[in-house]
Amino acid sequence: MMNPVIEAILKRRTIRAYKDTPLSRETLRTLLDCAMWAPSGRNSQPCHVRVIKDKALLRELDTDFWNKVGRGTPAYTKCDVNPVYQGAPALFLIYTPTEDQMNSGLAAENIAIAAEGLGLGSCIIASVGSLLKAEEGEKWKKIIDIPEDFKFQIAIAVGEKDEDPAPKERKPENFRIVEAE
Ligand SMILES: Cc1cc2nc3c(=O)[nH]c(=O)nc-3n(C[C@H](O)[C@H](O)[C@H](O)COP(=O)(O)O)c2cc1C
């Protein structure tokens, strides 16, 4: 049997079709804990993470997003059929006091791998930054209780998978052991 952590890492795929099943508070809490336990440079722990699970709020976020970017803009994969949160029942949002893609990325990946470990799907979403990094994103900081001067970094949609996409091709030649001589 494969080690379960390795299995979750190797089997995770970006999921863009979700069942309409809400996630339990326990599951959301577990995923938040996994984000919290991500390593951070100098143990700075800069990430502030919120998870939105309320459908009306998710729809409002999608409306604000499209009002910002303009309909007809090919804003992200499946944007012709999916809302910006990919129709998932939960959307994690990561903010930091200053721009910090590295530490946020580690927290985001912890959520994605933990979700896979729980049998759930995830999609890391940068595109919603067009709204959340803009002036119009200030409203959302108030709604989710994030300080005004914080910077949005990345979002992660999580939910029960409703698709089983084929793995995307990788570039093994970019990952090599250095052989002496
Ligand atoms: C930093 C980052 C930003 C991403 N932003 C989006 C996004 O805005 N919308 C989306 O549908 N997928 C997004 N993705 C998912 C990627 O498209 C996906 O990871 C990539 O195609 C590889 O597929 P895989 O995750 O199934 O291996 C993002 C992934 C990363 C790591």
Image (cartoon, helix red, strand yellow):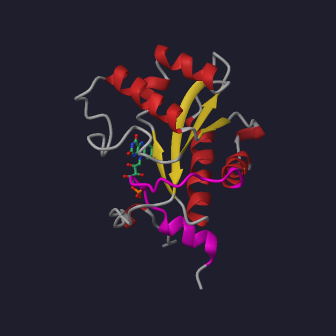
Q: Position of residue 63 (x, y in %)?
A: 40, 27
Vertical side of 40 occupied by 30: above or below: below
Q: Is residue 6 magenta?
A: yes
Which quarter of the rendered picture does the N terminus lie within? bottom right
Q: Residue furthest bottom?
A: 1
The stretch of residues the image draws in magenta is 3-26
- Is 20 positioned to the left or the right of 29 in the image? left
Vertical placement of residue 174 versus 102, above or below:
below
Q: Residue at x 64, y 16 (%)?
A: 148
Q: How many marks?
A: 0
- When the figure is inspected, residue 82 is found, relative to residue 74, above or below; the finding is below
Q: Residue visible at 50% across and 72% down?
A: 179
Q: Position of residue 174 (x, y in %)?
A: 40, 60
**Residue 95 on the magenta segment:** no
Residue 51 vertical position relative to residue 6 in the rendered view, above or below: above
**Residue in front for this viewpoint, 41 or 74:** 74
Left or right: 92, with 37 as reference point: left
Q: Residue at x 37, y 20 (%)?
A: 68
Where residue 45 sits, quadrant-wise, is: top right
**Residue 49 position by quadrant:** top right
Q: Quadrant of residue 80?
A: top left
Q: Residue furthest top?
A: 135
Is residue 113 in view from this perspective? yes
Q: Is residue 150 visible?
A: no
Residue 180 placement (x, y as % from top left): 52, 71
Please, which residue is most extreme toward the right here? Answer: 43
Residue 30: image location, x then y, percent: 71, 54
Residue depicted at 44% across the width and 24% down the height: 131
Q: Nearer the viewer, residue 8 or 45?
A: 8
Query: Residue farthest to the left?
Result: 72
